[in-house]
Image (spheres, rainbow, N blue to C red):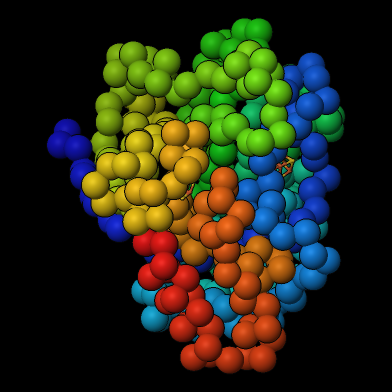
Amino acid sequence: MKVKQNAFDWPKHLRLLVNKECNYQCSFPGTKCEWCHKDGIHVNSQVKSADISDFLFLAQTLKEPFKLEKLKIGAMEPTLFSGVETIVSEAKKMKFDEVSLTSNGYLLANKLAVLEEAGLDTLTVSMHAFNPEVYRSVTGIDGFERVKNTVEKASQMNFKTVKINRVLLNFDNIWEDLMAFFKWAAKFGIRIKLYQLIWSKEMDSKLYFDNFVSWKALHLYFKNNGELIETNKFLVPGRERMVWRMKDGLEIETDVFYHKLSEGTGKVCQNCPEVANCQEGLMSYGLEVNPELTMAGCLLRDDLIVDLWSTVKERNKQGLVDKVNGFLKGIV
Ligand code: SF4
Ligand code: SF4
């Protein structure tokens, strides 16, 4: 099969991080040291929380000017945000090509029906181990069977895609864990996305070293049991997303971030003091707005942010477009 190859400047996605709460504390297995890097909510410590109408104003106002195709709802844990299904249904009315939600799955069972009814296209659940004990050790919650059952149920519903996000962590019998995980996902038609562990400033160096495992170590397995079907290159973040299809039909996505001095990466990256340490990329997953209505450029640079709070609260459409445009022009 010919590999489908696409190149984009960056993902035309709006990612709404709707809250700062999570019922899990994802840690390195066997330790209580957290690796969750609290993506998107690390930049601002003020106690402000946007509401549903703020998020909808953002989506409605930014969609056309920035040619946004997908609306992604994330957070720490969006099932703890009351009325998340309203964002889904309203975003569908705005004609986003895809509306997705990412959750740890623990509180999802009771929300499946309303999310389906609201028109959610893609449901993504995080599962970082396929063994109940390791799952508990990573998340701090004895929730493996409950989450697995919820995902199986969701796979029988009308969502277009049900997906599992897994950050690869190194623990005993990881190979057996992955093989059981792949087999289960293939059986239920679930897509998998594998992430590599990204360091954050608070992490202990030894714990990072002990727990890091690259999906590239699975390359030979992919090659012998499937094929690469698609590559998507995002130039500004310096990110390449690959899709592999296994012989049993299972599709697995992997991400690579290449060096930020490559041609095409964001201009702010070209002179960045963090460039040698950067494992992610600028606007890696599109425009990302947190509950304090701050938009951030990347994980490591707390100075690359723009505060949209007053502009959104005043419902100032042109002001919002101008602010986001100005921010992008300064960094991209
Ligand atoms: S479930 Fe997600 S947001 Fe919550 S602690 Fe784990 S990685 Fe962080
Ligand atoms: S830390 Fe941010 S600005 Fe610096 S190279 Fe990485 S993505 Fe670019």
User: 58 and 253: which one is in front?
Assistant: 58
Q: Position of residue 143 (x, y in %)?
A: 80, 33
Q: Position of residue 257 (x, y in %)?
A: 39, 37
In the figure, is residue 139 to the left or right of 265?
Answer: right
User: 112 and 235: which one is in front?
Assistant: 235
User: 191 and 260: which one is in front?
Assistant: 260
Q: Residue at x 83, y 66 (%)?
A: 47
Q: Residue at x 35, y 36 (%)?
A: 258
Q: Position of residue 182 (x, y in %)?
A: 51, 24
List the single residue furthest toward the top: 173
In the figure, is residue 177 to the left or right of 328?
Answer: right
Q: Position of residue 135 (x, y in %)?
A: 74, 25
> Which picture quadrant has residue 207?
top right
Can you see residue 331? yes
Q: Residue at x 54, y 59 (%)?
A: 304
Is 2 above or below relative to 171? below
User: 10 and 83: which one is in front?
Assistant: 10
Q: Residue at x 26, y 36 (%)?
A: 229
- The quadrant in which the N terminus is found is top left
> Which picture quadrant has residue 158?
bottom right
Q: How many marks?
A: 0
Is 34 above or below relative to 102? above
Can you see residue 136? no
- The quadrant in which the C terminus is found is bottom left
Is 261 above or below relative to 13? above
